[in-house]
Amino acid sequence: MTLKVAVLGARGRMGAEVCRAVEGADDLDLVAALDAGEDRSGAEGADVAVDFTHPDAVMDNLAWCVGHGIGVVVGTTGFTPERLDRVNELLGHHPRVGVLVAANFSVGAVLMMHFAERAAAFYESVEIIELHHPGKADAPSGTAAATAARVAAARTAAGLDAPPDATSSGLEGARGARADGIAVHSVRLRGLVAHQEVLLGSEGETLTIRHDSLDRVSFMPGVLAAVRALPERPGLTVGIESVLGLT
Ligand SMILES: NC(=O)c1ccc[n+]([C@@H]2O[C@H](COP(=O)([O-])OP(=O)(O)OC[C@H]3O[C@@H](n4cnc5c(N)ncnc54)[C@H](O)[C@@H]3O)[C@@H](O)[C@H]2O)c1
Ligand SMILES: O=C(O)C1=N[C@H](C(=O)O)CCC1
């Protein structure tokens, strides 16, 4: 069966890549490629919409798609627990519709988050450095925020206190931002795509887990797997771990 796919944010960096990937797949049909200000009615009749837009736009797109019975694969970042609650609320009125939200669709980034979560219980110190292209709207990245949440939960479960840090003076921001109590440092540099390091340390050793997306094609296998899985997944799915068979 051919799935009808609409792309929202179609002229953006990710949306354009998704359009190319959908057009290149025999089992998918690109029925709408829409960007800001364009009439969403072009997406009516799609089986799945893919949203790579902006944290300020995505909730409205989601409400529209779910209200029209269209499942949504969401790559746009900015999904706080409150936003996920709102998505669940929307889906409560449309129980046959599926929404999958993932901060990162690259297989390597999914594994990097998984390894960081596993390692977190064994190290006293942990910090995250995320590095992205300078066109990125949000900081820290959605991937860094998701990693911090998972690492913080693993530390709590292991009974670890806050990472040691004797800093008592310095320039504001020098120690990064705090996401779930974990220091996150955001670099924006021309030439980069999407990169992250999780630095872990204890007495006498460190462990660095690093992932690099060198091209946006790295996100496409995950996006297409989510599109293909969505019709069989009503309700909210967070992350692509279950789609990839990692959980
Ligand atoms: N989950 C992932 O794997 C992943 C990977 C890369 C980027 N992202 C996220 O995807 C989002 C987009 O990233 P990007 O680099 O493609 O940004 P971008 O700025 O290149 O593209 C966003 C596009 O969305 C359009 N847009 C804005 N509002 C819209 C609306 N209401 N309806 C339709 N289109 C709208 C913009 O005009 C633009 O063309 C960001 O939140 C980014 O963090 C996620
Ligand atoms: O390029 C971006 O923007 C990216 N956004 C996601 C994030 O914020 O984690 C995923 C990586 C690329």
Image (tube, helix red, strand yellow):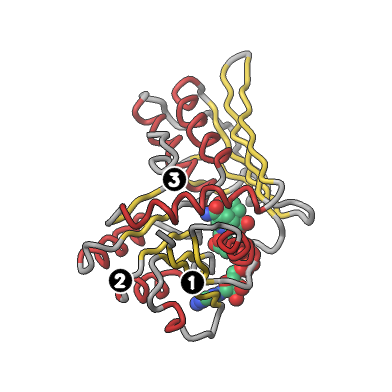
Looking at the rendered structure, which numbered label has been put on residue 69? 2
- Write down the quadrant of residue 19 in the picture: bottom right
Rendered view: 49 above or below 224: below
Q: Is residue 139 among what the camera can see?
A: no
Q: Residue at x 63, y 47 (%)?
A: 218
Q: Residue at x 45, y 35 (%)?
A: 151
Residue corresponding to mark 3: 240
Badge 1 amino acid: Asp
Badge 3 amino acid: Ile
CA distance for labels 3 and 1 = 23 Å
Helix, strand or loop under label 3: loop
Sort mark 1 into few (<14), some (14-19) or many (20+) by Cα contacts within 10 Å.
Answer: few
Camera-nearest label, 3 or 2:
2
Q: Give the tally of numbered discs.
A: 3
Helix, strand or loop under label 2: loop
Left or right of residue 95, residue 203 in this image: right
Q: Which x, y percent locates residue 194?
A: 66, 49
| Foreground residue among 104 and 72 | 72
Q: Which x, y percent locates residue 200?
A: 57, 27
Residue corresponding to mark 1: 56
